[in-house]
C-alpha cells in the first residue's frame, strides 16, 4: 500500500475527531468508512454513490465520461463521497495522504450532521436508503430477465422516465394536499364566480388533476390506464430516485459550506503535528479557493457561514482574522440555520451586500456568442445580481412544468404548462423530452410555453412534433367552451 | 456507537467492475446510432479523400439524455477576480472552462459528440451493408501459377535442386585444404582425384523461395466524364462515390490499386488530383474513356491476377453516334471486370430527359453491370448499395 497511514492511524484520528464533534455538539448518524481505489470511486460516482443501483446504459456513459476526464487529467477525483444514509456511508480514496484522510473525515462529519438534521432531507428515510436502492435494483434486474419484458423495453421505458424525473415536486417541505381537499377549496373559490356557467364550473371541478401537478411521473403512473404493472413500478422507482437526490441538489452550497466550515474548525481544534497541519492548510485553501468566472460552492458556502459566525460573535468581518474558534453559544444559531435553510433561502437571507462585493459577484448576459457582465454588486444592482444567482442554483436552473389537464378537450391529451419567468426552453431538448413524455402517456401531449417571446404550444402526437402559435391555439378551446355553453 | 472502517482489499477491487455491462450497452447504442446516421455522415464533404486515420466528430443522436432545460440566452451569475466592470466580456461560447455560472448540478446540459476514425466509420458502414466477402477469385486460382525465384544456395535440399558446379567447387576446395595440411605428413601426401569422393557437406543446392504475392489483388478503375458539362456538384457526387468504392474495396483486398481515367472526347489516365480538380471542356465520347480503361486493364490489371472494379460517372451527355461504340466497349469491360457500373449524375435542376445513357445501356444484359442514376448526395449511399448488391447476387450463382 503506497499510502503513509494504516487503518489504526485512521481509527486514532477518528477518535480525536469524534471528541471534537461531541464537544461542539454536532449531531451525526453513526459513521461508516470504506477505503476504495480510483476505479471504485469512479464506479460509485457513476451510480450516485449507491453500493447497489439498478442498471441503465446512462450510468455506463457517465462512467466512461468520468474515466476519460480522469485519465486525461481534466478533472481529479474527489477525496471522498458521502451518502445520505443512516448509518452514514462515506468512501475514502486509498491514495489520500494521512493528512487528506483526516481532513476528509472531519469534512464527512459536517455532511453527516447536515444530512441528519436539515429539514430538506427529513422525508428521505436515510435508514432505508441503501436497502431501498438495492431492492429496486433487484426488481429492475428481474424485469430485464423476465422473457416477457426484456432488456430493450425496460431500457427504453427508463429512457423516457429519466427524461422527466426532475419534473417533480421540488419542495418536499410542502405537503401535497389530498384531492378531496383541493376540490373542496376549488369549489369554494368557484362558487363565488358569477362570470362562469355551472357547466364550466362543473368541468373545472372534474378536471384531472384538480390542481396543477408537478409530479409528472407519478401523475402518469396513476392516470395512464394502459401501463403494465412493471411500467408503473419503474415510474415509482425513478421518481423515488429523483426525490432522494433533489434535496442534495437543493443544498449543494449550504451543505458543502457547512462541511468545509467543520473540517477547518475540527482540524484547528485538534492537536495536529505541524507537518500535517501545514499540508492541511494547502489542501483547505485549494478546496475553498474562489474560481473567477464561475462560482465555487465550497467557497461561497463557507464564506456565508463565516459571515454568520462573525456576526454572532460580534466580530467585524472586515478585520479579516485568520481563524476564530466558534463559541458554543454562537454555534446554537448556526445549528438552527443548518436545520431550516436550503440554498435558495440561505443565500437570500445571509448573502449580504458587503459579502457579495468582497467576492465580486456579478451578473452576466449572453450577447451573441459572448457572455458580458451586465451588473456588478454595486449599490443599485446587488439585489438584481443576487436574484440572478438564486435563479441559477440547484433546482432553480430546471424549468417548472406542470400538468394542467389530463384529458384536454376530451381527447385524453395531456396538457402542460411551463411556468415562464423570463427564460425560454431550449427547443431541441423540449422536442425530444416531449417525445419521451408522449411515449409514456400514449396520447398527444401539449406544452404551453414561450418561444422567441411569443406564446406557443409544443405538441407531440407520437408521429410528429409541432409548434403551434398560441394565438390560434388558445382561442380554439375558448371558442369551443363558449359554443358548448 | 463506534465508527466502522472497511479497509481496501485487492480482491474486492478485482471483482467490482460494476459498470461493465452498462458501459457495453452504452457502446452498443453509440454504434447503432452511428449506423442510423451513416448516410448523413458519409454524404458530408469532409471525409472524401481523407486518410483513414483521420478523426471525425460525429454528433450522436439518441445517446444524449434529454430533459427540459433552459436555453442558452438566459444569463447567470458568477464570481470575478475583484475588478469586474459592467460591459466586460467574461466568456465566449465554445470555450469550455470559461463558462461562467455554477454548472455543477444542472442536469441535461450534455453536448454529445463522439470521435471516430474514418476507418471505424467505414467498418460500420460496411457492416450496415451486410455484404459477404468479396473474394470472388478464390485464392487457389492465383497461387496455381505462382512462380518461385532462386535466392542463394544452401547445403540441404532435394536432388532436383542440386547445383553440380558449386558442389564440385566445394569438393575441390576441401581437397586443396587437405593437401596443404598434408604437406608435411607422409601418410596423407598422395591424395589423387579418383580416391577423393564427394561428401555430404560438399553438396550445394539451389535455394528457391516462393514469390511474395499478395493473396488478393484488386484494381479500381475510376472513369469520369470531365467534359465541360460536368460541373463541380456533379464532380462532387462522383468523388463521393469513388471514395466509397475505394474504401470498400480496400477493406476486402490486401492490395488495392486505383487508376483514374478522365475522358471527354479522348480518354487519358491522370492522377487523383487532376482527376477531381482539372476541368476540361469540349464534347463527350464515352467510348473513349472505356477504350482507355480496357487498355489500362490489359496492360496492368489482367483479370487472371486482379479483381477489377470499374465505375464510370457521367452526366449522360454523349455524342449520339458514339452510343453503339460505347455499348460495345462496356460489354468488353464487363468481360474483364468483377463489377462494372455506370452512374449517371443528373441534379434534378438540370434534367434533360433527352440525353441520358441509361436507356442506351439498357441493352447490356449482364449480371455484373449496373446502370444507376444519382440526383443528389442523399442518393450516393442507396446507389452504392445497389451497385454492391449486384456483386452479392453474382456470388450466389
Image: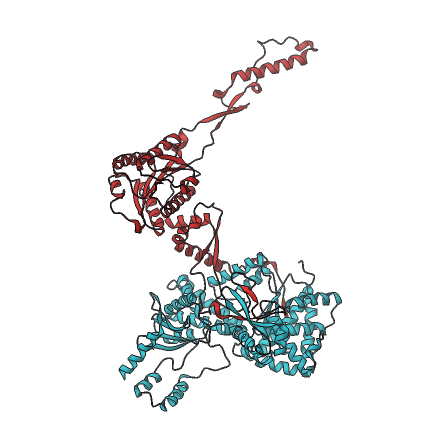
Q: Which picture quadrant has residue B227?
A: top left
| Position in image of residue A121 (x %, y %) | 54, 77
Quadrant showing the C terminus of chain A: bottom left
* Residue B267 as seen in the image, left or right of residue B20: left
| Position in image of residue A224 (x %, y %) | 36, 74
* Count of marks, rendered view: 0
- Residue found at x 42% / y 50%: B45
Q: Which picture quadrant has residue B249?
A: top left
Q: Is residue A110 visible?
A: no
Compared to residue A125, the image places residue B51 above or below, namely above
| Position in image of residue B261 (x %, y %) | 38, 37
Among the chains pictured, the one given cyan colouring is A
Q: Nearer the viewer, residue A252 or B42?
A: B42
Q: Nearer the viewer, residue A276 or A135?
A: A276
* Residue A307 as seen in the image, left or right of residue A411: right
- Residue found at x 46% / y 56%: B27
Q: Nearer the viewer, residue A323 or B212?
A: A323
* Residue B184 as seen in the image, left or right of residue A214: right
Q: What sort of colour scheme is used for the picture?
A: by chain
Compared to residue A337, the image places residue B169 above or below, namely above
Q: Colour of chain B?
A: red
| Position in image of residue B87 (x %, y %) | 56, 69
Q: Which picture quadrant has residue B296?
A: top left
Amino acid at each position: 500500500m503506497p499510502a503513509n497511514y494504516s487503518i489504526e492511524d485512521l481509527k486514532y484520528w477518528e477518535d480525536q475527531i469524534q471528541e471534537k464533534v461531541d464537544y461542539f455538539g454536532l449531531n451525526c448518524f453513526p459513521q461508516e468508512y470504506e477505503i476504495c481505489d480510483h476505479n471504485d470511486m469512479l464506479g460509485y460516482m457513476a451510480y450516485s454513490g449507491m453500493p447497489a443501483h439498478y442498471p441503465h446504459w446512462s450510468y455506463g456513459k457517465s462512467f466512461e465520461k468520468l474515466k476519460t476526464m480522469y485519465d486525461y487529467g481534466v478533472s481529479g477525483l474527489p477525496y471522498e463521497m458521502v451518502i445520505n444514509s443512516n448509518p452514514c456511508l462515506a468512501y475514502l480514496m486509498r491514495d489520500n495522504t494521512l493528512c487528506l484522510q483526516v481532513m476528509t473525515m472531519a469534512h464527512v462529519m459536517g455532511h453527516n450532521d447536515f444530512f441528519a438534521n436539515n429539514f430538506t432531507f427529513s422525508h428521505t428515510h436515510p435508514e432505508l436508503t441503501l436497502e431501498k436502492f438495492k431492492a429496486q435494483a433487484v426488481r429492475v434486474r428481474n424485469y430485464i430477465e423476465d422473457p416477457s419484458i426484456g432488456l430493450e423495453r425496460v431500457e427504453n421505458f427508463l429512457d423516457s422516465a429519466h427524461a422527466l424525473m426532475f419534473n417533480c415536486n421540488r419542495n418536499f417541505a410542502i405537503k401535497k394536499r389530498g384531492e378531496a381537499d383541493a376540490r373542496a377549496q376549488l369549489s369554494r373559490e368557484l362558487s363565488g364566480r358569477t362570470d362562469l356557467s355551472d357547466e364550466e364550473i362543473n368541468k373545472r371541478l372534474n378536471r384531472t388533476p384538480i390542481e396543477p401537478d408537478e409530479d409528472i411521473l407519478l401523475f402518469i403512473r396513476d392516470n395512464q390506464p394502459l401501463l403494465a404493472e412493471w411500467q408503473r413500478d419503474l415510474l415509482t422507482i425513478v421518481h423515488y430516485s429523483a426525490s432522494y437526490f433533489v434535496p442534495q441538489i437543493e443544498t449543494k452550497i449550504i451543505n458543502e459550506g457547512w462541511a468545509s466550515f467543520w473540517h477547518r474548525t475540527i482540524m484547528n481544534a485538534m492537536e495536529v503535528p505541524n507537518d500535517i497541519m501545514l499540508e492541511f492548510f494547502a489542501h483547505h485553501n485549494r478546496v475553498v479557493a474562489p474560481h473567477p468566472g464561475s462560482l465555487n460552492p465550497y467557497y461561497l458556502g463557507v464564506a456565508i457561514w463565516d459571515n454568520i459566525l462573525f456576526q454572532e460573535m460580534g466580530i467585524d468581518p472586515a478585520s479579516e482574522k485568520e481563524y476564530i474558534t466558534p463559541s458554543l453559544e454562537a454555534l446554537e444559531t448556526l445549528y438552527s440555520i443548518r436545520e431550516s435553510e436550503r440554498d435558495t433561502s440561505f443565500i437570500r437571507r445571509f448573502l449580504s451586500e458587503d459579502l457579495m462585493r468582497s467576492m465580486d459577484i456579478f451578473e452576466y448576459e449572453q450577447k451573441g456568442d459572448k457572455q458580458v457582465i451586465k451588473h456588478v454588486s454595486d449599490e443599485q444592482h446587488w439585489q438584481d445580481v443576487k436574484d440572478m444567482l438564486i435563479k441559477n442554483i440547484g433546482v432553480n436552473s430546471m424549468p417548472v412544468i406542470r400538468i394542467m389537464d389530463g384529458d384536454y378537450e376530451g381527447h385524453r391529451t395531456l396538457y402542460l404548462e411551463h411556468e415562464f419567468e423570463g427564460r425560454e426552453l431550449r427547443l431541441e431538448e423540449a422536442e425530444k423530452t416531449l417525445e419521451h413524455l408522449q411515449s409514456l402517456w400514449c396520447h398527444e401531449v401539449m406544452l404551453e410555453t414561450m418561444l422567441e417571446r411569443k406564446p406557443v404550444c409544443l405538441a407531440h402526437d407520437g408521429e410528429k412534433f409541432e409548434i403551434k402559435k398560441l394565438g390560434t391555439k388558445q382561442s380554439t378551446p375558448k371558442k369551443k367552451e363558449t359554443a358548448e355553453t | 456507537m463506534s465508527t466502522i472502517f472497511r479497509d481496501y482489499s485487492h480482491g474486492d477491487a478485482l471483482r467490482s467492475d460494476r459498470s461493465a455491462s452498462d458501459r457495453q450497452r452504452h457502446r452498443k447504442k453509440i454504434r447503432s446510432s452511428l449506423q442510423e446516421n451513416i448516410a448523413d455522415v458519409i454524404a458530408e464533404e469532409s471525409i472524401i479523400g481523407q486518410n483513414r486515420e483521420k478523426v471525425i466528430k460525429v454528433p450522436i443522436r439518441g445517446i444524449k439524455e434529454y430533459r427540459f432545460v433552459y436555453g442558452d440566452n438566459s444569463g447567470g451569475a458568477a464570481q470575478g477576480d475583484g475588478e469586474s466592470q459592467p460591459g466586460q466580456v467574461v466568456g465566449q461560447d465554445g470555450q469550455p472552462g470559461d463558462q461562467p455560472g455554477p454548472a455543477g448540478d444542472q442536469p441535461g446540459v450534455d453536448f454529445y459528440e463522439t470521435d471516430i476514425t474514418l476507418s471505424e466509420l467505414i467498418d460500420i458502414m460496411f457492416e450496415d451493408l451486410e455484404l459477404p466477402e468479396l473474394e470472388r477469385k478464390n485464392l487457389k486460382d492465383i497461387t496455381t501459377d505462382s512462380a518461385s525465384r532462386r535466392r542463394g544456395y544452401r547445403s540441404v535440399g532435394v536432388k532436383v535442386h542440386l547445383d553440380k558446379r558449386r558442389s564440385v567447387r566445394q569438393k575441390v576446395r576441401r581437397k586443396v585444404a587437405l593437401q596443404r595440411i598434408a604437406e608435411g605428413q607422409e601418410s596423407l601426401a598422395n591424395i589423387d582425384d579418383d580416391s577423393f569422393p564427394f561428401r555430404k557437406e560438399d553438396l550445394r543446392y539451389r535455394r528457391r523461395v516462393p514469390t511474395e504475392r499478395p493473396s488478393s489483388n484488386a484494381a479500381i478503375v475510376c472513369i469520369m466524364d470531365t467534359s465541360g458539362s460536368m460541373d463541380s456538384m456533379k464532380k462532387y457526387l462522383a468523388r463521393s462515390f469513388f471514395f466509397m468504392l475505394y474504401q470498400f474495396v480496400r477493406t476486402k483486398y490486401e492490395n488495392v490499386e486505383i487508376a483514374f481515367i478522365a475522358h471527354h472526347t479522348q480518354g487519358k489516365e491522370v492522377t487523383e488530383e487532376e482527376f477531381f480538380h482539372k476541368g476540361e471542356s469540349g464534347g463527350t465520347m464515352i467510348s473513349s474513356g472505356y477504350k482507355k480503361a480496357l487498355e489500362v486493364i490489359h496492360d496492368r490489371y489482367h483479370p487472371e491476377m486482379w479483381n477489377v472494379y470499374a465505375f464510370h460517372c457521367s452526366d449522360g451527355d454523349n455524342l449520339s453516334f458514339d452510343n453503339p461504340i460505347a455499348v460495345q466497349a462496356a460489354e468488353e469491360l464487363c468481360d474483364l471486370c468483377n463489377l462494372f457500373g455506370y452512374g449517371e449524375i443528373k441534379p434534378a435542376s438540370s434534367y434533360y430527359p433527352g440525353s441520358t445513357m441509361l436507356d442506351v445501356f439498357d441493352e447490356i444484359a449482364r449480371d455484373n453491370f449496373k446502370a444507376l442514376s444519382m440526383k443528389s448526395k442523399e442518393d450516393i449511399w442507396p446507389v452504392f448499395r445497389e451497385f454492391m448488391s449486384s456483386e452479392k447476387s453474382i456470388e450466389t450463382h
